[in-house]
Every structure is written in structure tokens, then in C-alpha cells.
Image (tube, helix red, strand yellow):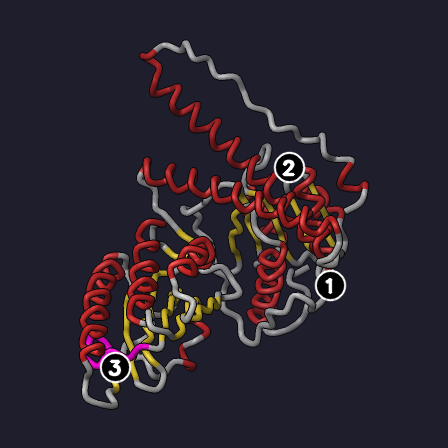
Amino acid sequence: MGESFAKNDLRNPLTVPAVDPSADVQQSEHSTGELLSLASRIFHDVNNRLLVIQFACAKLLRGLSSDDLNYSTLLAIEEARQQATELTHQFRDAQKAKFGKTQITDLNELVHRWEPLIMGVARENVIIEVDLSSKPAIVKVCHETLERILLHLCLSSLAIIADGGWLNIHTSHTDCERAATPDLPVPIPAGSVRLSISDTSCAEAELTGSRVIPSHEPSLTGVKNASLRRSTFEAVQNIVRDSGGQISVTTSADTGTRIDVFLPKHPAIDLPSAPEFDHRQDVPGSETILLVDDDTRVRKFIKCSLESHGYRVIEADDGRSAMSKAAEHSDSLHLLVTDLRLGGISGRELADRMRLDYPGLPVIFMSGLASADLDLDASCTFLEKPFKPAELITAVRFLLHARRCAVGSHLPLNNN
């Protein structure tokens, strides 16, 4: 990692304003507002620290072999970071539930979180495969509801194939799968996230909304499986429909049973579709990116990650400094990466002002707080801290590629 990062360890200390416990009860409403504001600031700063740890671990692990004495230590640090991140997510979900805010959930993260439990429930003769989409699968469904959908489907499949077989959990985005799934009995909703649960069972009975291909007379086991499948399907179907989604089942003797759940995608965090996008992280870039964050360590690690992929980076610690440095930059500016929470003008206001000089400038907003109320157009996306380096680079490359497709050329993205 080097001294360039280590020497900044004591900068940007995490300061916690004192709270007077003897405050008058009559001012409880005002105090609650102050406590929520304090909690938000701490939450944001903690997620910034977790992002730094994540980027540092990823950088160091890339340079170590598995037999290095420090390798296991770094893995332990990374595991602790994941656990701490989980705690921040629990706090976020609890805060949203308490105050009735619209909830959003990363389906990929949820599957990853429950994967150990699902593996633990399965018997030794059951093979479980997990295949998650390469970009965030953010849905407008609360955490608890999505858990019920996932666990209902997975646990019922494991019960049906208890004597042996395989279970596959797959997530994807329908905007890039419409042509690849002609066998589905229902139209694929545009702009949805797809959760597919497949297993080797074949329930020889008709299911609502399913396409069943029987190959022989139903056995006693088959009848029991069909009954379990039907009851599970009906329970999950109601949950999915209440969440604004759709569900479908396809069963055949050759391929087993696949249940597809389509859930509404959250537009503020979705990446725009762009044809022929290459998801590989090893493709170098050359564009110029304006990076704005008031946390020195976060800014340094993000800059290092961007520069390691070939991008040129202009960095600033607040909005006014960012506009000043952009004005001094004589070449084209291709992308703005900014934290939403800045001193002075906000990240959103900065983006609006920058687009006056750089029309159509793509923007990646970042924050340690969930931002479900962001109203973003197709040239923007949102990354909730702590995100992974690969997620950052994917978002950068996707927005730049989408912008080139939109203007129909590979010319600079601004009109200067």
C-alpha cells in the first residue's frame, strides 16, 4: 500500500459531538432530530472507513500469494470488514423501517448473506451453485420481503431434492436477457431484476402460470413434490405480486424446475443499458475523471483505483474547489465522481452546475447513506459506500460507454 496512504491515517478523525443526557423532556422532538442527524453523520463516516479498508485489502491481496504469512491476516481483516458492513446495513434497514421510508435491497448482497445458511441446510448429496449478476441487483423491495421470497424458494427446493440433486441460484437483469429467454410463459417485464431458483426436481402437476412438460405418470413422490411446489409457488406469488413483480415456473423432466421471479428495479441505482458493453475489468481507460470527496483517504484510494485502470484523475475536496479545478483544466472532462455529502454545495448541486459547462456529463454519486429518493437520469448512477473497487470500475466504464453510444461516436463527451 505504501507510505502515501499510511501517512494519512490520522487525518479526518471521526469526531462525535457530545450529547447532553439531561436535556429537557419537552425538547424530545428536537433532540430526536439532532440524534438522527448525528447518527447519519457517524453512519456516513463509518462507511467511508469501511470503504478504505476494503480498497486497501483488495490492493494488498492482489500482491500476495496464498502461502504468504500475511495472507490469512488480510483475509481476517476483510472478514471483519464484511461483518462491520453487515452491521451498518442492519442499522440502515432498521432506520428505514422505523421512519417508513421506501426501502431498497441489493439482491446480490442478500443472496451472498444467506448463502452459508442455505449451504448448511442442504444435505451432502445436494450441489448448490450461485451465479450472481456482474452489476448491482438493486430492487424496490424491502429487505424482509426479499428474504421471505428467497428462503421460501430455496428451502422448498432443498426439501424436494433431499435425496440428491442440484440447486442453482441465479440473478440477472431482464434488459439484457429478453432475447435469451423465449421459453418463459409470461412476458419479461422491462427494467426488472430476475431471481431464478432452479433444481433437478420435476413436479408432474399443473402450476398456475407455469409451463409443465410431463414425461411419465406421476409417482407418489412426484405428487408430494408437486403439492409442496404448488403451495410454495402460491405463497411466494402473493408476496411477489404485492411487491409489484411477476413470477413464473417452468418444469420439464430433462431440465428440472426453474422458478423465475421478476422484481421492480430501482432506477436511481441502476446502470443504463448500452449495447456491446465489455464487463472485463482489465480493459484500460484513458478518459479524464473529476473526483470529489471531502475524506482524504477515500479520495486517495478511489484515485489510485481509477489510475490503475488508465484513467486520468482530477481530485477536489469540495464543490467549489472542484469547479475551480475543472475550469483550470484545458482538456475534455468525461465523468464526475462525487460524494453527495460535501461541505458547502452538495454533490447533486455540483453536478447540476458542472452540466452547464459540460452538457450530458455522466455522474456517479456516492454516499455512506442510502439515497432511495434520488431522481437520476440515464447518465447517472449511485454507489452506496462501502462499494467494491470492481463495482466502481464497472460503473465508470458502463457510463462512459453508454455516453459514447448516446452521442454516436468516440469523440470527447463535452461540447467544448
Which residue shows up at 69% across the image and 40% down it?
A: 297
Magenta segment range? 201-211
Residue 60: give x, y in percent of width and height.
72, 51
| Mark 1 or 3, closer to the camera | 3
Give the amino acid at mark 3: Arg
Tell whether label 2 touches label 3 (CB within 8 Å).
no
| Quarter that holds the C terminus | bottom right
The Cα atoms of the two marked residues, 1 and 3, are separated by 49 Å
Task: Residue lying at the far right in this picture: please name it.
Answer: 3
Give the prevailing secondary structure in the magenta stretch.
loop
Residue 154 seen anywhere in this rendered image of the structure: yes
Verify whether residue 140 appears in magenta. Answer: no
User: For the residue labelled by badge 1, is the local secondary structure a helix, a strand or a loop?
Assistant: loop
Residue beneath the point at 52% across and 62% down: 135
Q: Nearer the viewer, residue 185 or 214?
A: 214
* Disc ID at residue 203: none
Q: How many marks?
A: 3
- Give the quarter of the image for residue 187: bottom left
Which image quadrant is residue 169 in? bottom left
Q: Amino acid at mark 1?
A: Ser
Q: CA distance from mark 2 to mark 1?
A: 25 Å
Measure the C-alpha gap from mark 3 to mark 2. Answer: 54 Å
Q: Which residue is mark 1?
A: 286
Residue sitting at the far bottom: 215
Residue corresponding to mark 2: 294
**Where is residue 38 shown, x and y percent of the image?**
48, 27
Residue at which label 3 appears? 211
Of residues 258 and 20, the one drawn nearer to the viewer in this rendering: 258
Horizontally, residue 65 falls left or right of residue 76, namely right
Which element type, helix, strand or loop, lies under badge 3?
A: strand
Specify the amino acid type for callout 2: Asp
**Which callout, 3 or 2, points to the residue nearer the camera?**
3
